[in-house]
């Protein structure tokens, strides 16, 4: 039976004895201690303790990555998130739905390079019926039975409930009515997309039309009950306060405790990983909001509006500051490392912390391995969402292995369960076989964009150009 570590609310978050116990897994932080650590602990000290905790869980030698492919099957979406540059209403020239053969072709390319998993998410398309998804999953399983299907984030599931009107008296029952046939058709696990920030004041401002935090967490609870693993995400560095970040982690931890207690003995799943990343502002409505301190009438010495509104229990209200939602506080590399390190200390019941090199760049992602992260994520064959917001980092397997090795660890390929497939400790390792690194500077990044190779979706009669571009 799952027994959470002991809390010591009378101790300071900076108390070394408490931190030693947290690193060993014998104690857990309270929200107040988490906030104190974020606000007062020097970054290098926070990194030290996060690294200690990571080594307790994952050892001193191996850090992992996965070979998968992000497949965004449509960019048509009913939500109007202000941080998104990817979504389309459906009548634009570049709106698309991937047809089945195009999508299967992407998986075939993944398998050809040794990939084991697809991460398949899309916009919330109101015109795709449930059979479209079931037949797609069945086709994937028939042609690529070895590929793990990690698909459909919680906001997609909530819209499935809204679109398909499944049977059930409660939201949980309705989600189960949709999720069970998808699981039977070939869904293996559920990704944590759409987490953003759970605090209602923030979520209502930036995620128009997106599900509530409770609905998001309920989707994951049903997935765990059905024996599927999940992940959780947090997008920060916009209008939220620091207390909102801690509250977000607290909600992940609370629901994980509950699900482990309820389902673990019966073979239930769990949240296996937490990944956080800063908001990417290019081409987004939210990105046009002024930075705090640069708007008319701003007092940069006063508290950031998000911090005034934020509370550790998520009950903050927008009326607490007239500029809430009208100013952003972007997060750079130090803020990213601080937030990631805190997540490793705080989320004592989550196995993996992922380093977000996709948004932060390869070398900050590499440093993240010393700030609590045990996993470098995916070899990036394709990415459409954050690249729409101006982020275009791309790494192949040898480069990813080299980054891990240069950080002082052995690179190892993993699967979705975080089981190690192979440890690269010999001369045949992908990075050690490279004789001339200059030949690997150009990387192939697949993106849905205008091009010469159209593919048409039978569901929406939409033309889908697919191009392959070279990026340094």
Image: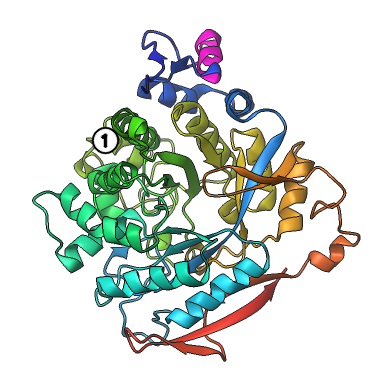
The residue at the point 62 percent across, 23 percent down is: 52
Image position, residue 452 (x, y; %): 57, 91
Q: Quadrant of residue 441?
A: bottom right
**Residue 209, how many percent across, how many down?**
24, 61
Where is residue 442 shown, x and y percent of the image?
A: 75, 70
Q: Is residue 173 left or right of residue 302?
A: left
Q: Which span is picked out in magenta?
A: 14-23
User: For this rendering, which residue is in front, 420 or 82?
Assistant: 420
Q: What residue is at 27 percent from the left and 46 percent from the top?
A: 222
Q: Nearer the viewer, residue 442 or 224?
A: 224
Main secondary-structure element of the magenta-colored stretch: helix
Pick out the residue farthest to the right.
435
Residue 56 location, quadrant = top right
Q: Quick one: 88 or 42, which is closer to the camera?
A: 88
Residue 104 drawn at (x, y percent): 51, 76
Residue 209 appears in the picture as rendered: no
Residue at position x 35%, y 73% in the image: 135
Q: In which quadrant of the rendered image does the N terminus lie?
A: top left
From where the camera sits, is residue 304 visible? Answer: yes
Q: Is residue 418 left or right of residue 157?
A: right
Mark 1 lies on residue:
314
Name the image quarter holding residue 41: top right
Image quadrant containing the C terminus: bottom right
Q: What is the crowding at mark 1: few (fewer than 14 residues within 10 Å), some, or many (at least 20)? A: many
* SS at circle 1: loop
Look at the picture and state if 125 lies above or below 419: below
């Amino acid at each position: 039976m799952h027994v959470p570590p002991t809390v010591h609310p009378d101790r300071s978050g900076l108390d070394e004895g408490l931190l030693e116990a947290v690193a060993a897994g014998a104690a857990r932080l309270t929200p107040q201690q988490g906030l104190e650590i974020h606000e007062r602990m020097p970054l290098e000290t926070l990194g030290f303790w996060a690294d200690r905790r990571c080594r307790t869980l994952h050892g001193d030698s191996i850090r992992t990555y996965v070979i998968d492919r992000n497949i965004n099957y449509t960019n048509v979406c009913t939500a109007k998130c202000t941080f998104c540059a990817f979504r389309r209403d459906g009548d634009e020239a570049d709106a698309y739905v991937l047809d089945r053969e195009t999508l299967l072709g992407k998986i075939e390319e993944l398998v050809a390079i040794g990939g084991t998993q697809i991460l398949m998410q899309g916009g919330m398309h109101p015109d795709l019926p449930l059979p479209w998804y079931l037949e797609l999953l069945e086709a994937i399983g028939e042609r690529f039975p070895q590929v793990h299907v990690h698909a459909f984030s919680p906001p997609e599931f909530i819209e499935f409930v809204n679109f398909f009107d499944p049977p059930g008296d409660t939201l949980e029952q309705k989600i189960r009515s949709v999720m069970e046939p998808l699981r039977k058709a070939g869904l293996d696990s559920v990704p944590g997309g759409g987490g953003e920030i759970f605090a209602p004041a923030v979520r209502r401002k930036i995620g128009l039309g997106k599900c509530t935090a409770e609905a998001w967490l309920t989707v994951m609870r049903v997935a765990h009950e059905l024996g599927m693993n999940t992940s959780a995400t947090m997008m920060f560095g916009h209008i939220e306060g620091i207390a909102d970040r801690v509250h977000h982690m607290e909600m992940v931890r609370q629901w994980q405790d509950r699900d482990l207690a309820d389902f673990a003995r019966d073979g239930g799943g769990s949240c296996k990983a937490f990944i956080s990343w800063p908001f990417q502002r290019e081409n987004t409505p939210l990105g046009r909001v002024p930075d705090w301190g640069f708007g008319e009438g701003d007092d940069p010495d006063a508290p950031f509006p998000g911090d005034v509104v934020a509370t550790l229990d998520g009950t903050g209200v927008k009326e607490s500051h007239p500029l809430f939602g009208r100013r952003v506080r972007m997060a750079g590399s130090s803020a990213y490392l601080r937030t990631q390190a805190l997540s490793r200390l705080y989320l004592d019941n989550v196995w993996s912390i992922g380093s977000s090199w996709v948004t932060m760049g390869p070398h900050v992602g590499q440093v993240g391995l010393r700030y609590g992260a045990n996993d470098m994520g995916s070899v990036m064959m394709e990415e459409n969402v954050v690249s729409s917001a101006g982020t275009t980092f791309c790494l192949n397997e040898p480069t990813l292995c080299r980054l891990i090795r240069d950080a002082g660890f052995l690179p190892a390929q993993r699967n979705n369960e975080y089981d190690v497939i192979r440890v690269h400790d010999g001369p045949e390792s992908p990075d050690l076989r490279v004789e001339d690194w200059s030949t690997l500077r150009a990387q192939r990044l697949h993106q849905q964009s205008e091009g010469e190779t159209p593919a048409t979706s039978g569901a929406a009669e939409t033309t889908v150009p697919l191009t392959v571009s070279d990026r340094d």
